[in-house]
Amino acid sequence: MKTLALLLAFLAADDTLVDAAKDAKEKRKKSTTKVITNADVKKSKGRIATTPNVTAEPVKPEPTLMEKHTAAKTAERALAEKRAASDATIAALEKELAAIEQQYYNENDLNRRDTEIVTRFNDVKARLDAAPPQP
């Protein structure tokens, strides 16, 4: 008997829960936006704007690591050759300048020393100053 009373009480409570759930569902805010379907798009009288196909320029591929390494080695080799040529030019001019200076001090003829040797010295000194700096 107790179980029957308990079962009836549970069923009555269950009905109130169902009613409360239905009331809560009705109170929920309904969506105010309309879902646009394909049929709605076909019915619309608006114009669809399309952009012309722009022909893109071909993309230049990124150089590979091997190509980058080869280019770096080539640039380094060219720089080393340029540095060696610059060093050789500077060394030759310094050697010539030292020889002219020594000739200046060894010369006994003051007129020749002050006219010829000084002008040669100044010319070589100007070429040495104009030589490209060390890269």
Image: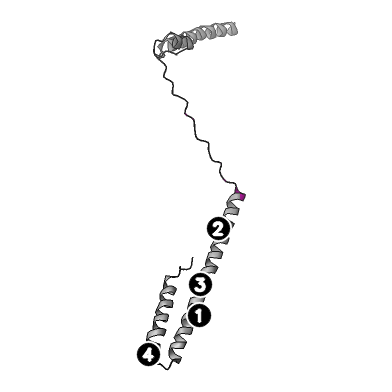
In the picture of the structure, the residue carrying the numbered disc 1 is 95
Give the quarter of the image for residue 121: bottom left
> Given contact means CB atoms under 8 Å apart, are the residues at marks 3 and 2 in contact?
no
Image: magenta residue range: 54-66
In the picture of the structure, the residue carrying the numbered disc 4 is 111
Spatial separation of the CA atoms under disc 4 and disc 2: 51 Å
Instruction: Judge the density around disc 4: few (<14), some (14-19), many (≥20) Cα neighbours within 10 Å.
Output: few
Callout 3 amino acid: Thr
Q: Give whichever of discs 1 and 3 has the lower sequence position.
A: 3
The residue shown at (40%, 12%) is 27
Give the quarter of the image for residue 80: bottom right
Spatial separation of the CA atoms under disc 3 and disc 2: 21 Å
Q: Please, is residue 90 above or below residue 45 in the view?
A: below
In reply to whether residue 60 is colored magenta, the answer given is yes
The residue shown at (39%, 81%) is 119
> Given contact means CB atoms under 8 Å apart, are the residues at marks 3 and 4 in contact?
no
In the picture of the structure, the residue carrying the numbered disc 3 is 89
In the picture of the structure, the residue carrying the numbered disc 2 is 75
Q: How is the image coloured?
A: one colour
